[in-house]
Image (tube, rainbow, N blue to C red):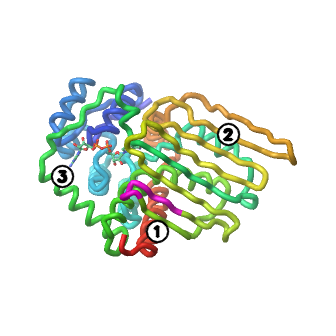
Amino acid sequence: MSRIRVGVIGAGMISQVEHIPNLLRLGDLFELVGVADPSRISRQFVTDTHGVPGFETPEQLFDQRLDAVVIGSPDPLHYEQVLTGLARGLHVFCEKPLCYSPAEISDIIAARDKAGKVMQVGTMKRFDPSYRLALASLPGMAKTLRSVSVEVNDPDAWPFIAHHPYRRGSDIPKELIASAIAKQKDQVEHAIGQPLTDLAFRGFTGAYSSALIHDVNAVHGLLDALEVPDGEIVGAQIFANGDGGQGAVKLLGGQALWTMTHLTVPKLADYKERITLFFDDASLELEFPSPWLNHHPTRLTVKTSDGHTLSTRDLRAGYGEAFVEELRGFWGAMVNGDPVVNRPEHAARDQALLVGLTRRHLAASPAE
Ligand SMILES: NC(=O)c1ccc[n+]([C@@H]2O[C@H](COP(=O)([O-])OP(=O)(O)OC[C@H]3O[C@@H](n4cnc5c(N)ncnc54)[C@H](O)[C@@H]3O)[C@@H](O)[C@H]2O)c1
C-alpha cells in the first residue's frame, strides 16, 4: 500500500472540522505533511491541536515533498491553486465549487490531462452510503419519472460544529481579503457574462454555487442512473436577500419537472435536506442530516404501490461518513487507478446549470 504525502491549503472550518482530522484518521493511507493558511491563528491552532506543521503561503507548502494537495481555501482561490497544484505534478482534491464558470473548469480539465494526475471535487454526497444505495435501488425508470424535488433549509454549520475543536482566524491580511474579493467579482462576471445585481451576485455565489450545488450534483448522478438527459431551465428565483435560491428544470420534454429550493435559515438550529423522486407508482426519498453530523445516516425510503397496497421500505446502508469516504476514494484513484467519482467534468455540468439559473433569475427580475 502506498502512503500519500498530502498538504492542505486553507485551514478554516472545513479543513479543521473535516479534512485534517479525517486525513489523520486515515493515517495508513495519508501522511499529512502540513497546512498552509495566511492566518497565524488558524495554522497555530492546527499545529497545537494536531501537531501538523503550518506554512504561511501555499508556495511554502508546495516546496515540501508532496504527492497530493487538498484545497479548502475560499472559492475564488480554487482556480489558481488547482492549476498550480497540477502544474507542480500533484494530485489535487478541491472543495466545491471547483470554479464559478464551466470555462475555468475546462482549463482545469486540460491541465489535469496534461499532468496525468487525479483531480477530484469535494461534492461528497456521492460518497454517502445511502446515496450509493439509492442509485442501486431506484424504484422506477425514465419513462415513469414524474418529478424530482429538492428542499433544503439550512442554518449553516454553527449548531452542528460547536462540539468540535475549531478556531476561526481573524488575522488574515487585509490585502489578501481584498484580492480574493476582486477575484470573485471578476470570476462571477465572467461566468454569468452579463452585469449582475447585488441580489443575483449573492444568490449565485451563496445559495446556488455554495449550497444547492450539492443537491444539483446528487440529482445529476440519480438522473444519470435513470438515463435521463439534461433538461431545460424553466424557472429560477433568488430571494431572501440571496440566502434563498430556487429553480425549475423541465425533464424529458415536460414528462417530469425537477424543482429545487435552498434557503439559509440563519437562526433556526434545525436542518432539512430532502431529495425525492416520484415515479408513476413509486417514490424514493433521501433525507440528509446536516453534513457536519458525521456518521449520522441519511434516511433512504422507497415506496411502491400496487393498487391500494402501499409498501414502504427504510433502507439502511451503514454508518460510513461521506467526508471520510471521499478521501478514501481520492486515495484509491491515486494509488489503484480507481475511477474518480467526482470529476471536474461533473463540476462543469453542475456549474452550467447554476449559471443558467442565475441568468434566468436576471431575465425574470432584471432590477433585482
Ligand atoms: N463540502 C462541503 O460540504 C463544504 C462545507 C463547507 C465549506 N466547503 C468549502 O470549503 C472551502 C472553505 O470553506 P470554509 O467554510 O472552511 O471557509 P473558511 O473561511 O472557514 O476557511 C477558509 C480558510 O482559507 C484561508 N485562506 C484565505 N486566503 C487564503 C489564501 N490566499 N491561501 C490559502 N488559504 C487562504 C482562510 O484564512 C481560512 O482559514 C470553500 O470552498 C467552501 O465552499 C465545503
**x, y (%) of residue 300?**
64, 38
Q: Secondary structure at mark 3?
A: helix
Q: Residue at x 70, y 43 (%)?
A: 137
Q: Residue at x 70, y 66 (%)?
A: 255
Who comes first in sequence, dot 2 or dot 1?
2
Rendered view: 280 above or below 155: below
Which residue corresponds to the image point at 78% horizontal and 45% vertical from the top-left? 304
Query: Residue 114: in sight, yes or no?
Result: no
Highlighted magenta segment, given as a residue range: 240-247
Q: Quadrant of ligand 1?
A: top left
Q: Residue furthest right?
A: 307
Circles 3 and 2, Cβ within 8 Å, touching? The answer is: no
Cα separation, mark 2 vs mark 1, equals 31 Å
Pinpoint residue 205: horizontal percent, then vertical percent: 35, 58
Residue bearing mark 1: 356
Label 2 crowd (10 A; few <14 / some 14-19 / many >=20): some
Q: In terms of secondary structure, where does tag 1 sit? A: helix
Residue in view at x 42 percent, y 73 percent: 365
**Residue 252 is drawn in which quadrant?**
bottom right
Residue at image mark 2 = 301
Which residue has dot 3 on it? 177
